[in-house]
Image (tube, rainbow, N blue to C red):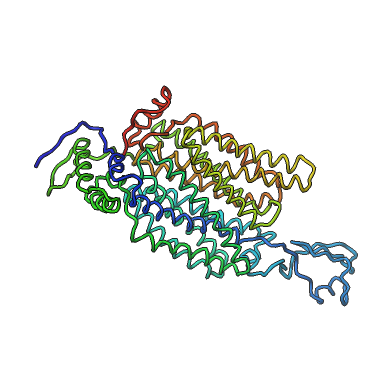
Amino acid sequence: MDTTKKKPGNKIDVDNLLNSLRPRGRFQLTQYFLLASSFVACCASFLKLLFIAYVPETTCKRLTDSQLAAFGYEGNVTDGITYQSCSIQIYNRNSSQNETLSCINGYAYSMNKYKSFVSEWDLVCENGYLSELSQTLYAIGCFVGAFIIPIFSDKYGRKPAHFISFVLLLINEMILPMVRAYWVFALLRLTEGIFNYGMVMPAYSTMLELFPGSIRTVFAASSGIIWGSSMLLMSPLAYLCRNATWRISCLVFGIIATSFFFEFWFVEESIRWLITNDKLKATRKIVKRAAKENKVNFNEVWEKCVVVCKTMMPMQEKNGEPVPEAKVEDLGVMTLVRDPLARKISLILIFNALMNSLTYYGIYMTAAELAGNYYLNFFLTSIMEVSGNVFMLFILRKFQRRTTMVCFQSFSGISLIISVVIKFAIEPGAGTAVANKVFTLLGMFGISASFCVLWLYAPEVYPTNLRNSGLGLMGMGSAFGNMIAPFSRYTARHIAWLPSTIFGVGITLGSFFLITLPESKDTQMPTTMDDVRKLKTEYKFKSRPKDTLVS
């Protein structure tokens, strides 16, 4: 048995292998778009509540004749009675006093009661917070999923985490429209958040790990465009269901998760994850399939891989196959806390993920408060998201990641602050309503691009065995912002200027923190924290690094 020794600390150059397979080959593109199709299910899971939890105009139901008689009224005489949204103002003829009654007979709605679960379960007035609570519970589920699933994904693989979560999400979606009690619905929204995040996070990691650093930017940015396009589909879908009950609409949105069946048979495990975790037998199988689909010579590619492994890892031969003796540096989750640079990166990224998420989803949540048609406002907001991501794709080719994030975040923050000033510091009119909508949409343009770059940047500054855990922490920050975002709609009804002010100030502050982080443009993904420190050092003195090892 022959053993090839090497110096400790060397790593496998996976980018070299991926380039040998043709980085834009049929295999990579097929895997990329299959995984990206799960974005549609993810968007449907989150945004459906904006359409099935619509809050209609509400008034108290009228008092009966016997109830009116108790206040001294006879016949059809109703002078002195005012039916409001949450109370009844009535003049008591017996005591000659004005009284305020609750809606003792329930509520009357401006639309079919069963078009929204808010009206079906009377989640208005003193129970109004419950409609927003269901979305907050969903965000709590996302928070839990962002903590648990990445650990599972880093240990057992991207594919198991993705598909187990996808199946559970589909089951959850099929049960949700059938529930008859609000609290059961709210509990299912909690589990839906866990499964949805567990489904999309490993998918996104795998999508990025398909490509070498030289073209990763293009495909990461393209994922933002696909995400925005998925959001764009929700408005016409909701419009088509506008006359259906909320249960039918919920089922239509849930059926999208059946795309799982198309993915399952074709999506493979991440080659990068397999090699990092010394699973070379599984790697060989996938590389063979990739070589066949990309029409390259498998033997040449595999021999190149074996040579790389033998020169960069201690290897043994067993039945003609390379078997590693040593593993890539095993980094525990606590490294994110103990290592000063990892801790700094994580805290800044968590804060920015929180503010980006809060602003991004908050703008969607408050779309109904803008002037004009609700469905049209949502559609225009989605259009601005796609436009921002397309523009960002071209900008990223010329500028650094940090510069791009800072510019887009600052642009969004300033636009949202201007929208507040226009709406509340200038005399109201048709022109101010339009200007307010324009600057709010510009805020979405900036934050959607910033959010996309943030998720492109983060995987590039975490080492391989911390990557999903780091993304998980970011996901927790994002989920916390998502958790708060539903109440921006509730807040906007009472303190209309507050949500956009918080959005604008928060993301502008976050952009200053981003300047202190290492740059990752034109680099390969790091394997160890030393590689991350190398990124920070090289960009202090050079416009771009010469080389960085990858896993």
Image check: 212 left or right of 68?
left
Residue 247 image position (x, y, % from top left): 56, 68
Above or below for 35 versus 413: below
Along the line of sight, the residue nearer the viewer: 289 or 257: 289
Total count of labels: 0
Along the line of sight, the residue nearer the viewer: 304 or 249: 304
Which image quadrant: the C terminus?
top left
Decide if residue 343 is in sight here: yes
Residue 263 image position (x, y, % from top left): 38, 59
Above or below for 282 versus 257: above
Along the line of sight, the residue nearer the viewer: 460 or 102: 460
Image check: 343 left or right of 65?
left
Q: Residue shown at 87%/75% (left/top)?
A: 76
Residue 280 image position (x, y, % from top left): 23, 47
Q: Quadrant of residue 37?
A: bottom left
Residue 66 image position (x, y, % from top left): 81, 76
Q: Quadrant of residue 550?
A: top left
Image check: 147 left or right of 484?
left
Image check: 446 left or right of 63?
left
